[in-house]
Amino acid sequence: MIPALEIKGINKSFGPMRALSDINLTVDQGEFFALLGPNGAGKTTLISILAGLCVADSGLAKIMGKNVVVDYQSARMNLGVVPQELVYDPFFTVREILKIQSGYFGNRGNTEWIEEVTNSLGLLDKMDQNMRTLSGGMKRRVLVAQALVHKPPVIILDEPTAGVDVELRKSLWKFMKNLNSQGHTIVLTTHYLEEAETLCKRVGMLKQGRLALLDTTQNLLKRFSGISLSVKTTSSAMPKSLDHYSMDFLSDGEWVFRLSDYSEVEGILEELRKANLPVKSLSLREADLEDVFFSVIKDN
Ligand SMILES: Nc1ncnc2c1ncn2[C@@H]1O[C@H](COP(=O)(O)OP(=O)(O)OP(=O)(O)O)[C@@H](O)[C@H]1O
Ligand SMILES: [Mg+2]
């Protein structure tokens, strides 16, 4: 089967700034894939290259087998992108915007599909409202609908849930899961890592323009498995005797120890007692994608 996305040796610089370095990535049809990375890692740049909004300095990218440069139109027909930025035309109603967008893709007989999309996104009662009168979350729903008017097999969502309420987030994911189960390939970038963990079977992590990690979510959680012990004491410093532990200081006075076994907790508490540092709060949890993310960002 042709891959949904095929990215080979992509490089992109903005002046002296290397935004992407030798990116190689294949996403199969039907995958629900997470593209993660801290601010400025290159996620949006990679998406812009796929969407034909930005041209790579070298390398090759294909969507459903169509080269995004030499076969731009076919590639774009196969792709729906929900952009990170809220860009919209304030002079049109939701209905008009969706009609215009359908026109771009040469789609006319798609009324039923548009109705299904707008219904699933809770937009039906907003169809005749002007874009500028919609709330931020509603505008974002329209951006999602806009990306889907031509029923693309590959859908890329660039932080679609930034600044949206829990209800929309849930309904958006339900809708995306449904599209995925119908065979659509979905690539998601998000800073909500629990979202990626529950939705995406495979994860790619970009760090300073490089693909620092690529594996199934399950393997990553296994590989980085461990226990996090979060402790707050009356002091912001930890006793020297705990120096051999892997630990991070969080800005709110909390220390996070990375443990491989629950039995280590007792030893840590004992050292705190010896140092006369009363524990103000303590919590234990098993490693999640956020721990994987932080260890990759720190180490690689
Ligand atoms: N048009 C541009 N001109 C110059 N530099 C750019 C341009 N677009 C992106 N960059 C730079 O390229 C790097 C990658 O940016 P990009 O927007 O791809 O990151 P990102 O991973 O999407 O980050 P975020 O999580 O903040 O959205 C950044 O350093 C950014 O400043
Ligand atoms: Mg971005």
Image: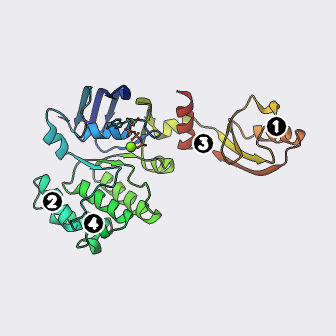
Is 217 situated above or below 112? above
**Circle 4 SS class:** helix
**Circle 3 SS class:** loop
**Circle 1 SS class:** helix
Q: Amino acid at mark 4?
A: Met
Location of mark 2 (residue): 100
> Counting residues from the N terminus, which is met first, the one under dot 2 or under dot 4?
2
Q: Amino acid at mark 2?
A: Ile
Please state the horizontal and vertical placement of residue 109, each as a whole percent of the image.
10, 62
Q: Give whichever of 176, 100 is nearer the camera.
A: 100
* Local crowd size for mark 1, using a 10 Å CA cut-off: few (<14), some (14–19), many (≥20): few
Please state the horizontal and vertical placement of residue 186, each as a whole percent of the image.
33, 47
Question: Does the CB distance between marks 4 and 1 fall below 8 Å?
Answer: no
Mark 4 to mark 3: distance in Å? 42 Å
Give ligand 2's quarter of the image. top left
Location of mark 3 (residue): 287
In-image side of 235 versus 289 (left or right): right
Please state the horizontal and vertical placement of residue 211, each as a whole percent of the image.
41, 30
* Local crowd size for mark 3, using a 10 Å CA cut-off: few (<14), some (14–19), many (≥20): some
> Counting residues from the N terminus, which is met first, the one under dot 3 or under dot 2?
2
> Counting residues from the N terminus, which is met first, the one under dot 1 or under dot 3?
1
Q: Is residue 113 visible?
A: no
Please state the horizontal and vertical placement of residue 167, each as a whole percent of the image.
44, 65
For the image, the number of numbered tags is 4
